[in-house]
Amino acid sequence: HGKEKSSMHPSRVLVFDFGNVIARFSHRRAAEALAAFSTAADPARLQAFCFGSELDDAFERGRVGPEDFRGRVREEFDLSCDDAAFDIAFADIFQPIGNVVGLARALAGRVPLAVLSNTTPIHSRWFLDRMREELSVFDHLVMSHDTGFRKPEAGIFAHVEKLTGCASGSHVLIDDMPANVAGARAAGWDGIVFGPEMDLLAELSRLGVVVS
């Protein structure tokens, strides 16, 4: 682990989850905003329909497109809104987590950085635009809907490895979901289960990533 070795090639590729690592989000907020376009929609039922469901899974894999998704939600809950209003209600749910964004900025150019998100095209279009500056420090932005896979499946980690050109063992996934970190470890990666009170810098230092 000497300095000479690390200066020759990057010892680590840091792969950040987006939701609840780079930005907080609220599915409830989306459900309430969409329910406002209906006279009788129950936000809890709308949330269960849109998130963590089979439809959500297909949307995050790119098997269902935005038009089909909007159509199914509109039909199920009798929503009266155009596409633009739907997308704002559905996607305006993110708040950057400043200390993680700051850490990524400090690491940029020293180690390869990537974002790996289980997400939908409506959400990614929103946050890739609204958080363009924060995300500009990352070398790779990998959205599940572009790959056909979702974390914690092996295929999505293999997709990242093709982009980075680095061996599986050099990657570290930083993710708030233990199942995703377990999937990364099964693929030969290191992993950190992220929490809001975590000293991420200390965790990275433990894995040999040093930020001066």
Image (tube, rainbow, N blue to C red):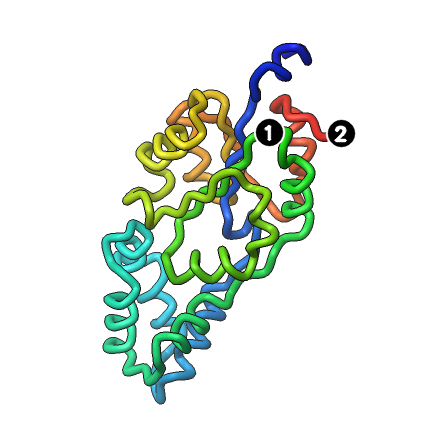
Q: Quadrant of the N terminus?
A: top right
**Which residue appears at 46% of the width and 44% of the height?**
141
For mark 1, give the secondary structure.
loop
Query: Which residue matches tag 1?
Result: 111
As drawn, the residue found furthest toward the right would be 212
Residue 102 image-quadrant placement: top right
Question: Mark 1: which amino acid?
Answer: Val
Direction from residue 50 to residue 92 in the image, left or right: right
Direction from residue 102 to residue 136 in the image, left or right: left
Observer-nearest residue: 204 or 105? Answer: 105
Question: Dot 2: within a 10 Å radius of its alpha carbon, few (fewer than 14), some, or many (20 or more) residues?
Answer: few
**Which residue appears at 37% of the width and 38% of the height?**
152
Q: Is residue 155 above or below residue 30?
A: above
Question: Mark 2: which amino acid?
Answer: Ser
**Which residue appears at 45% of the width and 26% of the height?**
189
Observer-nearest residue: 101 or 205? Answer: 101
Q: Position of residue 26 (x, y in %)?
A: 50, 63
**Which residue appears at 46% of the width and 35% of the height?**
181
Observer-nearest residue: 163 or 204? Answer: 163
Q: Position of residue 52 (x, y in %)?
A: 35, 57
Q: Is residue 73 above or below residue 197?
A: below
Q: How many marks?
A: 2
Mark 2–mark 1 distance (CA, rounded to whole Å): 13 Å
* Mark 2 / mark 1, whichever is N-terminal: 1
Query: Which residue matches tag 2?
Result: 212
Direction from residue 183 to residue 202 in the image, left or right: right
Q: Position of residue 200 (x, y in %)?
A: 65, 37
Direction from residue 99 to residue 112 in the image, left or right: left
Q: Is residue 149 above or below residue 157?
A: below
Q: Position of residue 163 (x, y in %)?
A: 41, 32
